[in-house]
Amino acid sequence: MIETTLEDFRPMMERCSNCLACKWLPYEKIESRRFGRNCPSAAYYSFNTYSARGRFHLGQVLLDGRSEFTEQAVEAIHSCTACGSCDVSCKITRYNLEPLAHNIALKERAVELGKYYPGQKAAIDCLEAERTMLPGERHSARTDWAKDLGLKDLTREKAEYAFFAGCQYSFGSGLAEKARFWAGMLRDAGVDLGYLGKADMCCGGRAKQMGFKGAFEKQAGANIAALKAAGVTAIVTPCSDCYHAFKRQYATLGLEVKTLHVSELAADLLAEGRLKFKKSIDMTVTYHDPCHLGRLGEPYVPWDGVEKKVLNQIHTWDPPRPRYAGTFGVYDAPRSVLKAIPGLRLKEMQRVREYSWCCGAGGGCSLSSPELSSATASERLTEARSTGADAIVTACPWCLRNLEKAVDENGRQMKAVDITELVALAV
Amino acid sequence: MALEREAYRAIEDIVGKRNVSEDSSVTETYRCITSQSSAHYGPFNHQTPRPQAVVLPGSTEEVRQVIRICNRYGIQFKVASTFWAAMGYVGSDRAIQIDMVRMGGVRIDAKNMMAIVEPYAIGAVVQVEAMKFGLNCNMAGVGCSSSVLAGAAGWMGFGPSSLFMGIASENILGAEWVLPDGEILRTGSLGSDGSWFCGEGPGPSTRAVLRGWQGSTGAMGVCTRMAVRLHPWPGPKLIPTYGEVPSYKADGLENFRTYTLCFNEWEDYARAFQLFHEADVIYLGHRQFNMFGRDIKGAMLKILVDSGGQFSDLLPLMDDPYVKSENEKMKIDVQIVLAGLTERDLAYKEKAVDEVLRQTHGWKSEFMLDKEMRDFVLLYLLRLGRKNLNYTLCSSYEGNFGMSSNVFVAAPLMEEASALKRKWEQDTPHIAAVGGDSDMGSMSGIGGGGTTGWEFFVHFDAYDKDSIRGTKEFIDDSQRWMLSKGLGADMGRWNADARREDGYDYTQEEHDAIYKNLPQPAIFEYQWKVREAFNPRHLTGSYYRTKTPENVK
């Protein structure tokens, strides 16, 4: 049985052994003191309460009635960026704990009790009214990016792939053009592609990560219906948040459609020779793994089982429970795209792949905890700059936005680039 | 009970608003659940007291000022940084928790082969910073997740590397230490310009007061910086790894070897330890994977080395004829790592190991020579980054038949201790049934002619109240058996005289009653005098064991 309520996590709360591995990179991957930490909220707020271990303990305390949802409890709960780095570090040694799922269950309980922030409410209200989590944007303008592109409207025509731009690429200044670019390029490369037309709306994935389960399920229900009606075999999206929503969150609700990030499709097209880079880009870049594409981008594996003890007290699951430890996230596809660009040099940061540092925008923290979000992005820019790169590249618009407006620890900005921009320059 | 407003505001003024909290959501999460970590006095189904506030100082000066406030208002304080066990948590309702998380500095003094570390510098970061200079630090058995400073000041400090590098207490070169009354004492040769250039320096040593033999368990002020000795590291500046999460493996360490050495008899095992202590050829030595249990260690290793491994594979793997047969051959085993400074040096060390095996009728496990297994074990032992596997089987463990002594003390009793534990595994469902023997421990230091540290891991479920209770009953029985053998306090009871069963500090009267009946009570009277000199207001709890002298009463 998958845990759905906070009470369901009680065994995990009591079985977490306070080792605090959730505050660090997998130890064997630590390269320096400076960049050894993994959890943005634990690093920023310092109290153990803000770590995954602290939240397991906090969950227990709240269920036992030993603390109310105080102001600081609510801060500790909502400051989780839901990046999943604690999950990876925990699962290096533990086989029966799900820290990230518990963090989100805590958020859901807080939301049920009305314990959330005005910034979060504005986004959820906007989701309800305008089907986007970007306050100020209107649904009527959502698909303007597709105007005159000649894409199939999947509410009227059939196509193999649905191109799902997501909120940021639909509305964002400078990003809508990138959605146009990808859709046009993929179509020109021979991909049978359409978009959802008037049925296009927010995936709602961030609502789930923020603890607004009801709002997420409403969005997901509508999107699943639209995708089923469209009859597509695959979704392709340039947004890592949407990617995670379709691949992992919607899959739990019964969506059985293949999900691809544009970087995966581009890597395939490059390998097949259907996409070629003709122009050279003389630049050194470093690649930021978006959490939702990387460690959280693993394929969903259905499971309905129970705990079973063997040899008296050893915990197992019957049948074996899938372990999402970041093993099968999308790490190589964006790197292979970057490496295929003539002249471009890729230098890696210390925290990469499954143990990448979050940009700070995850879990709705740019809405609920802007200072944390900004400090987290600053930390990433500092790390990026330490590689000697000219720019930090990412494959997620939420990461891009957060990194664009940040400064490093010395107050310096760094060029943040969407992978689309480089691909567009190189073709 | 809330702190006086004046005291709280004074602390707030020192560390800043965001670095102190008395919010229930924070203070409640700074209680130790004494079934959830190896507390060496339980396990119990309860928590330590709730601190009145949690304080995060950012400098030695802030620590000093906070402690002065504690002295002024009579508030107890307890310091911890990586919170591995109950000893770091407060023991009264009139106490604050000091968390050293904001002080994590590391400076490597390569010329003098030492690291100057702050409390939140964990082993993993000290090690990687040292390796950049061709140096390495002793990693206490608690693993690289824990504070190097706390390991050196607070507890035992035996580990796989202790054979080559000494135990933690032997590696302390100097300390910056805020005494319980708020004074700052800097040990080592600091007199001229404040730099750390050698060990304790001229004059009497204060190391015994700072940590004693066992470690001061956070009960003698706050150590804010420490100079620890570093040792040669003949490897790369960063250990390269390969393999998928979670089964990372060391890549290309050509001048390192790891072997699992196996023996027919415990007598041979002990004799091999003695010869290794004499031969001085081993970089790391630890009986590591037997912590899972004699019957299951081979199967567990197969799971761990495979990134898709699951515990549901355990029983089928235990039945696998090859694993079963190889596991049987590893019944009495120890893991070692050799490090060659040159090819010739490595060849010599290999020869020495072979000669020891010849003399003790031992052999190298073929099972553990598989490349991926070998690389996994090498990374495991060199970084000691997976000590949290201690908890993985059932979620918690406590140690029984644990001691630090000569290997010839433990070895003859190993099978009897195994039989006792196996009986409990078979007669009750409360502890994991892993084959009795779940001994783990290090070859440890060379002081005194060769010491070893060992303990049996007793795996139990911290969520299962019957399992907690049953484990406590087993540890009680193990303690009775230990006493019957004249071995003294079992490891699972080492702190039983430091904290009451309800999680609170002992009163002085209770301590007096305990220690007056122990052999050599004068030791605790001497400790009383030390405490009175350094900690006159008794502000750090009852982990500092004392007995009131008769002439004072």
Image (cartoon, coloured by chain):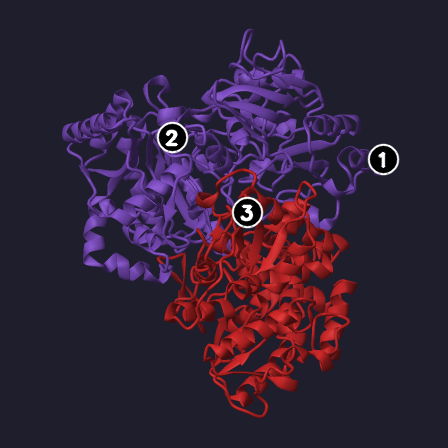
Chain colours: A red, B purple
Q: Which residue is mark 1?
A: B6
Is residue A299 in view? no
Q: Amino acid at mark 1?
A: Glu
Of labels 3 and 1, the one closer to you: 3
Instruction: Look at the numbered discs 2 and 3 and tell me whether their residues touch, using CB distance below 8 Å.
Output: no
Is residue B130 in view? yes
Instruction: Determine the residue positioned at 53% across, 81% down.
Output: A162
Distance (Cα) linking label 2 and label 3: 38 Å
Distance (Cα) linking label 3 and label 1: 51 Å
Between B227 and B516, the residue placed more toward the observer is: B227
- In the displayed structure, B287 sits above or below B451; it is below
- In the displayed structure, A347 sits above or below A95; it is above
Question: Would you identify the image quadrant in which residue B51 lies?
Answer: top right
Q: Which residue is mark 3?
A: A389
Q: Give the chain letter at badge 2.
A: B
Q: Give the chain letter at badge 1.
A: B
Q: Amino acid at mark 3?
A: Ala
Q: How many marks?
A: 3
